[in-house]
Amino acid sequence: MEMKNQVKNYLQTNDLDIGFQDLNDLVINKQNCVFCGSCISLCPRIGMNEKKPKLLEYDPECSTCFRYCPRTYFPTEMFEKELFNGDANKSYSIGHYQRLVAAKSNDETILKRAQNGGVVSSLLIHALDSGLIDGVLLTDKDDNWYPKPVIARSSDEILSSVGSKYTISPTLITYSEAIREFKLEKLAFVGVPCQIHAVRKLQLSSPLSDEYGKFKLIIGLYCFSNYTYDLLKTFVQGELGIPLSIVKKFDISNGEFYVYLKDDSVKQVPIKLTKQYAWNSCQYCKDFSAELADISIGSVGALSNEWNSVLLRTDLGVKTFNSAVETNKIIISDKVDLFKIEKTAFRKKTRITQINKKTLNTMRLLDISEFEIKTYTTLMSLGQASESLLSEIMKVEEKLVLSVLESLKKREWVILTNGMYNCVDPSLVIRNEINNLRKIFLEKIGKLNKEVLPNLEAIFVRNNINQLRHKNEL
């Protein structure tokens, strides 16, 4: 509870002396922005272009945009303790969950329009009908598949937004509208894993209203990577020559990118051809299965495209889902492949950012081995890890990893907490190394002045005194 109150106080503090420039420097310009739309929704001084938020007028440095950004301070452990009970399963790859099932809608109208099993739409409609929510923040599209954040307040509006867009969308941009214009009290949110961090912050403490805009249900979508709109405009319409107006839906499965057309034909290309259109910050995201959602839904692990795999995480998620099943809006099956979900999630969780050769060579000036450097940077990419996980990822024996970790711990490059290793902030690491180098060099300079120079001077004078004219030449 103390940690929760500390985080709430942080979110409510307006005197941090930081503003949009800090957000721009640390998030947007560092290619960390997930384009969720929260900063734009919370501050009237912030607008956007096609790919990032931008400041429209004077910034009073209230710090709201910075505090509620999903990429800034987010105490994951605190949120996990608040959300998940002690009976939940815990997996390194997919997080906490109480149950995994395959499911699909029991409504033929929904199934005809849905991406896969239609579970998201069925759950939202059920939540609306049962009074759990009175509106949903989700993403629709225009005729050219350009993403369009919307507030759905009826089953028809929910159904108009079915299907994956595969384009980054500022879904939370409508949050302020839901509060100020529609006065919605109980909201649901549907989005990708990175956006959910912003939603959980807003759920904990909203800067816009104490009465309206309470998030009651958060549904996360499986996501390995998202794309810029260029994927559709430049690749699908340009390179593949398919007008977006004739596309029925897109899908990604088994390493292939599918384009389904309205005439029921299908265009299929290898997913590797789409990588150049990936959203920049996706390469640093480790969350495949939306680990902090109430319910996570996708197609991976389902045995056919007509079903969804569903991870029920929180008590609220379990209760809402079971209620939809009991009212016959959703049917379920135990035919779901947990291993496949975990394998896909593990691949994303363990993606490593490699340092360039120049940085590697320069770091060797610190009298440290290449393997030690790679262990540190691997741990930096993972966030935290055990020696066994590092051994598996780096493909070396565990005892070697443990030996290197002990060495790095003594140098204060890593710390061990509750059996998990974390990397120390590189600014502290390098500052300490510079101080150590300075100390070593000062000691060497002292020895040169006190021990070496007097002896060399004596030898030089004895052997070259006839060539000396004045003392300054020594």
Image (tube, grey):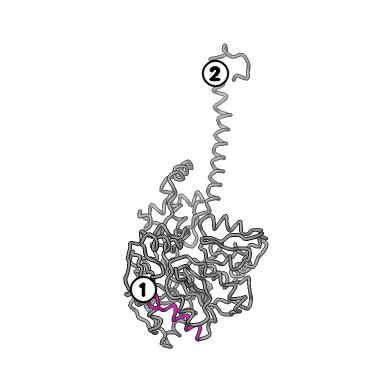
Residue plotted at (48% across, 42% down): 366
| Figure check: 346 above or below 302 | above
253 sits to left or right of 178: left
Q: Which residue is mark 1?
A: 262
Q: Is residue 208 magenta?
A: no
Secondary structure beneath dot 2 equals: helix
Image mark count: 2
Residue plotted at (44% across, 47% down): 356
Q: Which residues are magenta?
A: 113-129
Q: Quadrant of the N terminus?
A: bottom right
Q: Position of residue 370 (x, y in %)?
A: 42, 46
Q: Main secondary structure of the magenta part?
A: helix
Which amino acid type corresponds to the residue marked 1 in the rendered image?
Answer: Lys
| Figure check: 302 above or below 127 | above
Q: Which residue is mark 2?
A: 460
Q: 355 or 160: nearer the eye?
A: 160
Q: 430 or 243: nearer the eye?
A: 243
Q: Quadrant of the C terminus?
A: top right
Q: 464 or 55: nearer the eye?
A: 55
Which numbered disc, 2 or 1, marks the residue that appears first in the sequence? 1
Residue plotted at (60% across, 76% down): 179
Q: Position of residue 339 (x, y in %)?
A: 34, 69
Task: Report which quarter residue 93 is drawn in.
Answer: bottom left
